[in-house]
Amino acid sequence: MGNEESSPVDESVPPQTLEYRTLDGVARYIKSGKVRSIVVMTGAGISTSAGIPDFRSPDTGLYANLARLNLPYAEAVFDIGYFKENPEPFYTLAQELYPGNYRPTITHSFITLLHKKGLLLKLFTQNIDCLEREAGVPDDKIVEAHGSFARQSCIECKAPYPDNEIKEHIAAKTIPRCHACQGLVKPEIVFFGEALPSSFFENRMLPGEADLCIVLGTSLSVQPFASLPQATRQGTPRILINQEKVGGLGSRADDVLILGDCDDGVQDLAEACGWLEELEAVWATTAPKAASELGKAEQPKRTKDEKLEDEIDKLTKEVDESLNLSKWHEERVHGWQLGQAKKQPGGASPVASGWKFPHEDPQGDLSHIFFFDKAGSSSNSPKETDKKG
Ligand code: CNA
């Protein structure tokens, strides 16, 4: 299943369901009472204002920064083959990304508000940060298409592992082992070389039952997630709130494009619906205690970009330190590469033998989550990688 035709609808074509193809038109439709079930689709863009860097941007993304470190390649952090040999880098990163370190954004709270109003049919998210849960969206309303930190299990026997114990391990940067078989335990984030969760495939046709589809903060470049908006019925309004136009959104008569920051977009929509105060109240419940209440000095205010840069520096420094702590790690990386090469016919060097790292191999990668060009740098070109469909 690929992206639908992306030629924009002719302006002279009137909307079928909406009165106007604008944000106000969507608000009027919601307020009319005709909307009973809304499906929401989200990606990394709804968490950038929380301070979580996106992974793939050439300069600011986490991978671009990890690339200079002593990993065989930056994406190895999320590679199941590499994890089995060397889980430390992932657990170092996990400590930073683990739920509890970031506050949900007002966009996350907007989804919570839809749920509180009984309008949320389902939230499909590509994010692994659990901020939707922290904002108050209940488990049964969320499909985490690429997994998340919400659960963890043994990579060998699949036995679940207790929440409190993994928290202790992540805080201590130690590696959890399965109580049953001593296998490695990993949060159920979808790594390169792993399948998407069954909940995604069980729910992927659900958008066909919705009266409204809201797409927020995603490049819609990762399949099979990118095809979800196509599952809505013709005549079901779809609103995209994103920095850029993506996917086939804008090609149907009831598509509305709001290009810009998603926090601003959801506030404008809430205001047009008469919900702004409620939204702010829901978001206020996610606020951490003020620094002054905790007895710490107030920090000077920093811009979004400054906060994001700090966060990237912090994440890469942590991984850098962890990876350079010992010569042992370097030897492990070298040994791992040689070991992989030996598994190839002839056992020559990976390059000479034509052997590919998993992310370069179309049969063995996780490019339904991340894309890379041959040089290993990131790219946003769409790619169909759903091995199941
Ligand atoms: P992406 O491909 O990085 O696209 C993000 C999209 O959001 C782009 O179109 C941006 O223009 C847009 N965007 C960024 N900031 C904003 C903003 N403030 N307001 C509006 N739009 C914005 O990310 P996708 O989610 O589409 O790609 C899927 C990958 C990224 C998933 O597999 C995730 O696991 C992975 N990821 C997740 C997180 C997270 O959990 N927070 C962070 C980084 C990457």
Image (tube, helix red, strand yellow):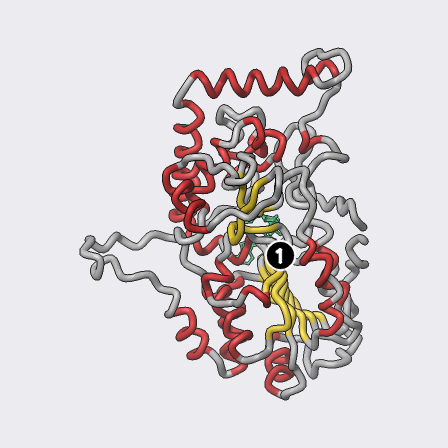
For the point 33% across and 52% down, which residue is it? 302
For the point 45% across and 56% down, which residue is it? 49
State the image quarter where residue 242 is shown.
bottom right
**Residue 275 vs residue 166, the one in the foreground:** 166
For the point 45% across and 61% down, which residue is it? 134
Q: Which residue in the protein does label 1 denote?
A: 244
**Residue 377 vs residue 334, the one in the foreground:** 334
Q: Residue 115, position in %: x, y?
A: 55, 74
Image side of residue 181 versus residue 255, left or right? left
Mark 1 residue CB less than 8 A from any atom of ligand 1:
yes
The answer to whether 210 is drawn above or below residue 1 in the figure is: below
**Residue 119 vs residue 84, the one in the foreground:** 84
Image side of residue 38 versus residue 260, left or right? right
For the point 50% across and 65% down, which residue is it? 107
Residue type marked 1: Glu
Q: Residue 126, position in %: x, y?
A: 61, 54
The answer to whether 386 is drawn above or below residue 38 in the figure is: above
State the image quarter where residue 253 is shown.
bottom right
